[in-house]
Each structure stands twice: as structure tokens, then as C-alpha cells.
Amino acid sequence: MKSEHRLVTKQPSNHPSQFDILVVGSGAAGLYAALCLPTHLQVGLITKGNLKTGSSSWAQGGIAAAIDPSDAPELHFADTLKAGAGLCEPEAVKFLVENASAAIKSLLEMGVAFDRQGEKLAMTLEAAHSRPRVLHSADTTGRAIIDTLTEQVLHRPNIQVISPALAWSLWLNDSTGHCQGISVLYQEQISWLRASAVILATGGSGQVFSQTTNPTVSTGDGVALAWRGGAVVRDLEFVQFHPTALTKPGAPRFLISEAVRGEGAHLVDSQGKRFAFNYHSDGELAPRDVVSRAIFRHLEQTAPEPYCVYLDLHPIPPEQISHRFPNIIKVCQQWGIDVFSEPIPVAPAAHYWMGGIVTDVHSETSIKGLYAIGETSSTGVHGANRLASNSLLECIVFAAEFSRLEIEPNVITEKPAAVITESRDWAAEMEVISSMRQDLPQLMWHSAGICRSQAALEDAIAQVSDWRFELAALEVTQYLLNLTPNQTVQLTSAQAQQQLRICAETLNLLDIAYLILKSAAWRTESRGGHYRSDYPQTSPDWQVHTLVQGESWSKSLNRGQLLSDASCTPGVTAQSAVTKYSR
Ligand code: FAD
Ligand code: SIN
């Protein structure tokens, strides 16, 4: 299709083109970071859906904090390290558990209504916690937190919300390599927003798998654009599969919280028999990867039917079910399941991505001026397997550090960017993209899901590489990849914006699929969320992080191992172990 470019010199859309700080994402991490930033800074908060769209508002079980007198941060620390299967960074975990109490206090002060038992905060038990320490607000804890944070953000004069807007690429300074802003797709324009610092809080990547508890916005954008920009990313093979997502034809994989098992529900098979204890002495409350694999194995024995197991809530008194799980009751009812009289059909689904953009405890990445928080980051607190309810806590604890951020306010006064009108439409190419978008999650579920092997991973890498090549050759992709900084593009149709958005998300999904597959093929052992049927054992030689930068894969020691074993694993340099970004 022929392009019609026209140069116009008018001021682009109704938001400023420069801010002191840009925050990308409005989950718990992004909202809380925006609120913690010093109020003299002008903050642009960019989000792809509306302010409340994201995994955070779907969180059910709660937020972990060792605040009960019978509990202690040291116990929370030990549980987190144990779940993390040798890859947690002790310093980061210490920071997390020691700041948990302050994080909860701040949320309470803002008005989050956690459930209480009398005067005391109520706490539940979740898998792999040695104490009941999960605070909750019925089974909609995330909604309670996000509603409160959103309300606060909307009352902050220094925060400007830009939504729905898709952050597409980092804007790096040619000579220093520092991050100086981003490009965004917003109101039928592509513009370049300048800032002294950019905070990525774009959440996870569950949409790369066909079975996922994650919302549609979870397409791994932050990791993809940081990786393309040259940032160091880490441990991308570690994906947590939640054991119990609703599994009914036509229904979404709605999460059935672990708290349901924490309160006493049993996992049973189609014969009504409990089976979790056949796989682990902690039965239903064993770590998530163990329970997910137990279900996977159990179903394998009876394949092709049935395709699910069941969660039997009978052991929980009905009034407790009503009190604790009103939303689960409601959603199950919508799908024709009465949780009081019948078990809930469930199966595992991709839930959380432990890997992400490497950061230190101040959320700094390897690119100056670029920060990452929440699920998109790899702070080191989750290791190879996240302890339940530690991620909301991580969002709040790490975001709170932004109150100390010292940056030079963005004083550059730009001339208004030239505006180019773009009237192209890429409808003809969208079919190819749609079919990739549909097929990729199936491929990933079968090759990089609960059980992986070299052969399946290599086949998938070949297929994904072909798709990436095919996608890169399309005109719409070339258009996106060759956008020029500081030049605003005015699209002439909403359809073109939608096409660019789909293309951008598909590029991101393909990039992260490639990174997950390559990292999973590289790690020839099983650990935490990464299980290889051809390497079923955990190997001490692999108690290392997988670092990726561009096309280079390498190992870096984690601090936990360094502290317990001063000797270096062959092939891993001591220097890589102490690099700032492997903290
Ligand atoms: P999110 O909350 O996912 O927010 C990401 C934001 O980034 C969204 O606003 C999205 O629109 C935006 N975004 C993404 N890409 C772009 C882009 N390119 N441009 C602009 N904006 C973009 N954890 C717990 O600790 N306890 C729980 O009980 C719990 N329950 C869960 C239940 C479910 C169903 C799910 C899916 C997860 C649950 N988790 C839980 C995990 C936890 O909710 C998430 O890890 C955490 O909320 C992530 O927060 P976040 O702010 O990093 O990302
Ligand atoms: C759940 O409620 O089971 C999810 C908790 C979590 O992912 O931390």
C-alpha cells in the first residue's frame, strides 16, 4: 500500500511530551511507585488498559507479612528461600521480609480494608508457608488494594494518567546509552515522551501460554522492550504454574485460590480419591510446582480423559466458605458450579513469571535511567519458585524505595515535535499476525509448560524463530521498528492504531517466547518452576542464574551460593557473580 506522508508542525495530543518520571503500568507496582515518588516531580503514568487492569486487581489469596507475634521475618525469610529452590538472593529476600510490616502499615493507613478477626488482622495459611501469615480481603485482596491505590493516584496533582496507551520502545540516548524516555501509542498517535527516568511496571507474561490465570494485558512487554534495548534479563525459564485454575469448556482459566486449600479443601481425582500425598508429604499444601506436577502426572495416567481434577470444599464449613470466598462462589456459579454441593474442576495454568529484568534493591536495571519493579523485574526475591503471596508484597516493598529517588528534574525544553500524518493501513497483513498470535500460546504450553524436554524445546525454538523472521519481514513490523525518535506520527484511523498495537504485542510475545524457550533449553536440570523430563534432578552445578543480554546467555552465581560456598562453579567467573546486576 502506498504511503502518504505529510509534514505538519502542530502540537501533538493533549499531554505534555516531557515528564520528570514515566511509570509504565498501573498494577500494584506502578501505582504504588507513582504514589511514593517525591511530589515535586511530574509523573506520567502510562497504562495499556484502564487504571485497574492487570494481575494485581485479580489477586485473590492475599499479601504475606510476618507480623503476628507468633511469627517472625526470619521464618518468612527461611520459607521464601526454601520455596526459591536455591536461587533466591538472600539480601533481596531480607529486604522484602524486613520491610513487610511497614508496607502493610502503609496500605492500612491508605485505607485498604484487610479482613479482621476481632481487633486483629486475620491471616491464612498458604502452601509452603510455615505460619498463617497471608493477610486478605475476602478473596478479592488485589481489588481492595488497587481500588485504594487508584483513588489516591487520581487525587495526586503531580501524576498525569495516560491511558489507554501502549509503551512500545525505550528511547536511549545515542551517546550515553541512558534511557531518556519511551515511545507510546496513544490516541491514534505515536509519540516520544522524554523523562529523566523510566520505571517499567508492566507485570507478567502469562498470555504467552494458552492456559493462564493472567489477564490479556500480561504480554511480557516490559521484558521484551528492555531486552531489545540491551538490558540484562535473568532466569526467564522459571515460570510458576498454579495448580488450580477453573477448567471447564468455554470458561476462562479463573484462579481458584490456594487459600481454598489453605482453609482445608482437598484435591481429588475423577474417582473422588485424594492423590496429592502420593507425590509429597505436604499433600495439597506442597509447593506449587510440586502440586502442579502431581496433577499433570495424575492426568497423564488417565489421558486423554479426564482433562481435570477436582477441588472438594466439603472439609470447609459452609459459613466459612461463604465468608472467605464470595467471589469464587459467584464466578463458579456463573459457570454452573455450586461449590457447596459439587467439587470444582481444576487444572494447572501459567500464573507467574519469576524471571525478569535484573534489578538491585533500588530497582535499578543495567541501563542508566531505567528502573523495573513488580513482576517484570528480577529482584532475586523469588528464586526459581515464588512463595505464595510474596508478589504483591514485593510490588509494595520495592516501590516504596522510590520515595528516596533523587533525580535531576527534566529541564530540557523541547521544541514541539513535528507531526507526520500516516494514512497507511496494514489490514492485509493482520491475518498472518493473528494466526501467529493464536498458535504461539498452544506451542508454548506444549513445549515450555509444566514438563519440558530438549527435543520439544528445540522444535519450538525453530518454529518461533521462523515466526519471528516472518513477522519482522512484514511492512507493519518494519514501520514500528523504524520509528524515528522525537517525531510524532498522527494515524488517520483507529483501525491502524489497533493494528500497530496487535503487531507490537505479538512481537513482544514472540520475543519472550524465544527467550523462555532458549533459557529452558540452556538449563539442563530441574529446579523450582522449571522441570525437564530429560534432566529430572536438581544439579548443584546449576545453582546459578541464567543471564541474558542480547543473544548472549551466561551463568551468574547467586549470593546465597557465594555465601555458603566460596568456590566458583567451573565456567562461572567470580566476577560475574559480584556484578552489580546479579545482586
Ligand atoms: P500487573 O498488576 O499485572 O500490572 C501491569 C500493568 O502494566 C497493567 O496496568 C498493564 O495494563 C500495564 N502494561 C503492560 N504492558 C504495558 C505496555 N506495553 N504499555 C503500557 N502499560 C502496560 N500475588 C500475590 O502476592 N497474592 C495473590 O493473592 C495473588 N493472586 C493472584 C491471582 C491471579 C489471578 C493472578 C493472575 C496473579 C496473582 N498474584 C498474586 C500475582 C500478582 O497479582 C502479580 O504478580 C502482581 O500483582 C503483579 O503486579 P505488577 O504491578 O507487577 O503487574
Ligand atoms: C492464590 O490466591 O492462590 C494466588 C496467590 C499467589 O499467587 O500468590
Image (cartoon, helix red, strand yellow):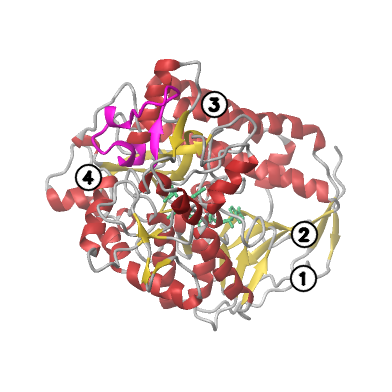
| Quadrant occupied by the N terminus | top right
Q: Earlier in the sequence, mark 1 or mark 4?
A: 1
Q: CA distance from mark 1 to mark 4?
A: 51 Å
Does the CB distance between marks 2 and 1 fall below 8 Å? Answer: yes
Residue 338 x, y percent position in the rendering: 56, 39
Instruction: Tell me: is circle 4 under 8 Å from ligand 1.
Output: no
Amino acid carrying label 2: it is Gln
Residue 187: which disc?
A: 2
In screen coordinates, is 526 left or right of 41?
left
Query: What residue is drawn where x is 74% and y is 37%?
Result: 475
Q: Local crowd at mark 2 within 10 Å, few (<14), some, or many (≥20)?
A: some
Q: Which mark is residue 443?
A: 3
- Identify the residue shown where x is 61% and y is 77%: 412
Asked which secondary structure carries label 4, the reply is loop
Chain part drawn in magenta: 265-289
- The residue tagged 4 is 573
Q: Amino acid at mark 4?
A: Thr
Q: Is 120 located above or below residue 478 in the figure?
A: below
Disc 3 marks which amino acid? Leu
Q: Amino acid at mark 1?
A: Asn
Q: Nearer the viewer, residue 352 or 90?
A: 352
Above-or-below relation of 257 to 520: below
CA gap between label 1 and label 3 equals 42 Å
Examine the rendered structure and indicate whether residue 65 appears above or below residue 243. below
Say few, some or many: other residues with alpha carbon within 10 Å of mark 1 (under 14 / 14 to 19 / 20 or more). Answer: few
The image shows residue 72, relative to residue 492, as above or below, that is below
User: What residue is shown with label 1?
Assistant: 14
Q: Is residue 472 visible?
A: yes
Task: Select label 4 or label 3 by which is in front.
Answer: 3
Locate the C terminus and report the quarter of the image it occupies: bottom left
Say which label, 2 or 1, has the lower sequence index.
1
Distance (Cα) linking label 2 and label 3: 34 Å
